[in-house]
Image (cartoon, helix red, strand yellow):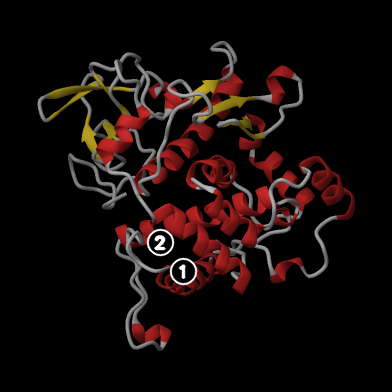
Amino acid sequence: MSSAPRCPHCRHFVFLGTLTCPNCEGELGFNLLDRVFYGVRQGHAVIEGVTWYTCSNRGWGCNWLVREDAAAGTCFACRRTRRQPDSNDTIALEKLGKTEEAKRRLILQLGELGLPIVPWDVKKGGLGFDLVSSLSSGERVVIGHANGIITIDLAESLDDRREALRVRLGEPYRTMLGHLRHEVGHYFQNVLLPDDAAWDRCRALFGDERASYQDAIARHYSRGAPEGWSASFISEYATMHPWEDFAETFAHYLHITGTLQTAAAIGIHLDAGVTNRDTDVEPLESYRDEPIQRLLTDWDWMSQAFNRINRSMGSADLYPFELVGPVRHKLAFVHDIVTKAPLTLPEQIALALPRDTERT
């Protein structure tokens, strides 16, 4: 967000998923194009003379707005979902609402970074989401990314199930948003590496992704991560295969930039008197024009502060990871390819929409 989300009626702070202001009870709708909340009356808002309607999935928690001339009644984020539970599967749809909220936050961040989002229904291999539930079908859901489509098992939105999976896999952190950030890393590895030279640089850091993935899976789940893995990787899962190392690193880049952006938007900083530095630690809303050293230095300080706050509440660390030298080099590579040529908003819109149809 370019600024802290506020209610347009009373200027009270609101969260990105807010439907109704908790202070004045005004109805709210979020506009993706200018990233601002607007007041909603009788299901619509007028923005610069144009009527926008609430997304038809508002009943499941979506607070985004849709232009009056859009071809469908769903917003840009909801239209990226290719498959979802049947309309009569109310239990699964409740889980869908939580997952869609995480997906909206993901799409908003990708847009703010200037990344290209070419939808699955616009171009073959474009980005899309299959959000299905193994608890409804009784069948195993193969989660992951393939040809632009990210498949998520909605059962993972259940806290106890996700926590059990986190413990079984030995992960210090697992959330639905984190999972989506990881999977979208697979998508952008193919999108952001335009030529052989870029792939060669990537392989020098992450390894050769052409190595057998099936062999890597078998090796990882039979032997686990190699001894001393933490000296070179951000997580045990990253050791499995170069694809997973890149996706894990990309996810952490989104974790870091997203959290720093939020801190900047609401005015959080660390006083020099506390850090014993010459200057305050002031996170930025965008690091697009900053070197990776500035980004990681800010994060080193801010993540320590966030961890201390969490511990004061008896909670686990917000960011329970150590950024060792090799991981910092990998993050520098991701920073380089993400910031090399960010798209303008009109360019993003041109890529995201069919040439002859809808508007966001």
Q: CA distance from mark 1 to mark 2?
A: 7 Å
Give the residue pinned by disc 1. Answer: 299
Q: Is residue 335 visible?
A: yes
Q: Secondary structure at mark 2?
A: helix
What residue type is disc 2 on? Leu
Give above or below for 198 relative to 226.
above
User: What's the residue at 37%, 20% (across, down)?
Assistant: 74
User: What's the residue at 22%, 27% (across, down)?
Assistant: 40
x, y (%) of residue 160? Answer: 69, 41
Q: Determine the residue located farthest toward the top in the rendered image.
A: 88
Marks 1/2 in contact by CB < 8 Å: the verdict is yes
Please give the label number shown on residue 131.
none
x, y (%) of residue 51? Answer: 17, 21
Q: Residues within 10 Å of mark 1 (few under 14, many from 20)?
A: some
Give the residue pinned by disc 2. Answer: 260
Between 304 and 295, the residue placed more toward the observer is 295
Report whether 286 appears left or right of 313: left
Q: Is residue 63 visible?
A: no
Report whether 7 appears left or right of 239: left
Q: Secondary structure at mark 1?
A: helix
Q: Determine the residue located farthest toward the right in the rendered image.
A: 222
